[in-house]
Amino acid sequence: MKRSTALLAAISLAALTSPAMVMAHEGHTAEAQATKTYTAEQFFESTAFSVGSPSGYNFSPDGKHVLVNSDESGVFNAYLMPLEGGDPVPLTTSTGNATFGSSFFPNDGRLLFTADNGGDELNHVFLRAEDGTVIDLTPGEKVKASFAGWNAAGDTFYILSNERDPAAFDLYGYAADGFERARLFTNEGGFSVDAISDDGRWVALSKAISSADSDLYLVDLAADEPQPVLISEHDGNVSHGVYTFTRDNSALIYATDEHGEFNQAWRYELASGAKSPVLEADWDVAFLQYSPSGRYRVSAINEDALTALTILDTRSGETVTLDGVPEGSLGSIRFDPQETRIAFTVTSDTSPTDIYVANLAGGSAKRLTTALNPAIDETDLVTATVARFPSYDGVEIPGILYKPNGASAAKPAPMVVLVHGGPGGQSTRGYNPMVQHLVNNGYAVYAINNRGSSGYGKTFFHMDDKKHGDVDLRDVVAAKGFLQGLDWVADDRIAVMGGSYGGYMTAAALALHPEVFDAGINIFGVTNWVRTLKSIPPWWGSFRDSLYDEMGDPAVDEERHRAISPLFHAANIIKPMLVVQGANDPRVLQVESDELVAAVKANGVPVEYVLFPDEGHGFRRKENRITASEAYLQFLDEHIGR
């Protein structure tokens, strides 16, 4: 389930957490440890892996391979991964644009994949034929498109495209043979097209009313004149989202927070309109999906930034147990068409995502990839803990705390407060080479989940609505006092850092609270909300009202936007700053960073600027991630030391 504010997020600053309160994990004691130090290049020589789309065919028709995406070459490409072991076989060979495999065709070796141009986010959907030739199925200079799944028969695949209207994504059906296409749904109401039933009859839509309120609609494509029908009548603010249709095409499984603080999974009967609960917990239901026949239900709960995944055999009512799987978080479950095998990922805070395959009938899982650079000893890396503290007004704020090996009261570590993107993002469990590189080189990291973060209930999430740059920023400021209370933290050497909205918070901290932090790293952060909110890319059109509801409408809230924009207060900045920007960024324009850097230079304050000509909002190229991480470490070494 996605929220409109997540559109501003750019990078996932993942972290690992466990239930603890305000204190570091007891396992990280003060005794010196013989920890080897590694370079940024060594950390990023680890390989990033993912599997294809959850709505695609991820096992090859011959059953011998699984579709994976990897940045082994330095930029993401699609590969055939042999299930019996061996080297992956490249299906795409891009050297510049990140390319992601979406789905095999059901009965042959053709491939659907997506790629943009230099990070401009204008993704197209491409076909790779079995002879290696490539066809752009969604041509057009300003077109943005995405793969949206297959019908059950395997003779039609779906694509969403904004070619008709830059602000609206229409649904198209393509014939698997010949690629004749038809527009199935014309999106004239600002909807998000979220799911299509297996029989191709039903389309589930969502529509944001505000940041706290949204609706669900169904379209019956078999009707003479298909029109969206509201199915989520409610009073007050209720957030809704779509998980999936049931495989028998009888019901829609949807998300709602109508019945409590957290998203629950509910069922809507297509024939009668009856609603009933499916899954609820004391945390958000992160996702729910079914195997091809519907026999297996896969669900996940976001438990305090840890994803807890369950595979349920609906016939027996038993939970599937996988043998031979190492400790870590499971994800991206992909079934073969016969439901005899699954491919899945496993990750932890000290190990990047690896891909495994297992037989559902039993037997040990088989590891297909080794993502961590073999030059790195995993025992040198750090397991994190969750730490909570009372903020300036008593609200409890959670965050993910990394303590470097060897840090102690006698040898305190400098600290980096890391702010996630969003504004409604969340720092979660998982391996992050950028974070581990800093921690391995002696820096403590606290990945704060300030108020306004997702994952902690709707009340916490909406505490910063139209108060951005104020109440959420004051949480970040208050974190310094908490961290100074840890005897192993160097209380006079604390920096702030973040990407996207976290980059904004970094710049705002230095401009609006100039004495608090000792340095800041702003990674493609907004500096001028007046301009940013007026220059939203057209494909965000269906989310604009919700975004304005949360951040404020630039037509009436310009004064407040100026008050919270670092650029208009840059004269206050007195602490060193590093700014990182992608030249092709459609969300935070390069001019944002150019102007901030010029303003800080005019203050006579040390400021460094790293501009990537081949990146957009985030990093797609491995060499650029390495360059950026080296710059972070060098900047911190110079200004807050080790």
Image: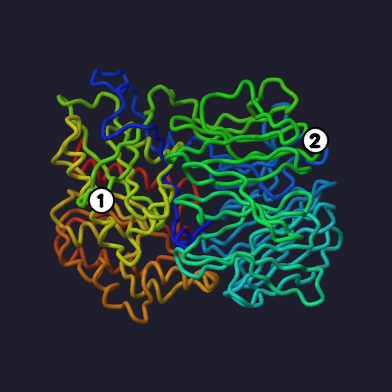
Pointer 2 local density, CA inside 10 Å: few below 14, some 14–19, many at least 20: some
Between disc 2 and disc 1, whose residue precedes? Answer: 2
Residue 85: image x %, image y %?
Answer: 70, 27
Residue under label 1: 476
Q: Which mark is residue 63?
A: 2
In the rendered image, the quadrant that contains the N terminus is bottom right
- Name the image quarter holding residue 252: bottom right
Amino acid under disc 2: Gly
Q: Which mark is residue 565?
A: none
Residue at position x 30%, y 49% from top? 497
Residue 537: image x %, image y %?
Answer: 49, 71
Residue 373: image x %, image y %?
Answer: 49, 30
Does 544 sit left or right of 523 as displayed?
right
Q: Is residue 584 visible?
A: no
Residue 518: image x %, image y %?
Answer: 17, 48
Residue at position x 25%, y 51% from top? 475
Does 207 sit left or right of 633 as displayed?
right
Q: Nearer the viewer, residue 388 or 403?
A: 388
- Name the image quarter holding residue 452: bottom left
Q: Nearer the viewer, residue 393 or 330?
A: 393
Tell me the element at label 1.
helix
2 vs 1, front mark? 1
Pointer 1 local density, CA inside 10 Å: few below 14, some 14–19, many at least 20: many
Amino acid under disc 1: Val
Residue at position x 28%, y 55% from top? 506
Q: Nearer the viewer, residue 545 or 15?
A: 545
Asked if residue 326 is positioned above or below residue 92 in the image, the reply reads above
Tell me the element at label 2.
loop
Asked if residue 371 is positioned above or below residue 120 in the image, the reply reads above
Asked if residue 630 is positioned above or below residue 317 in the image, the reply reads below
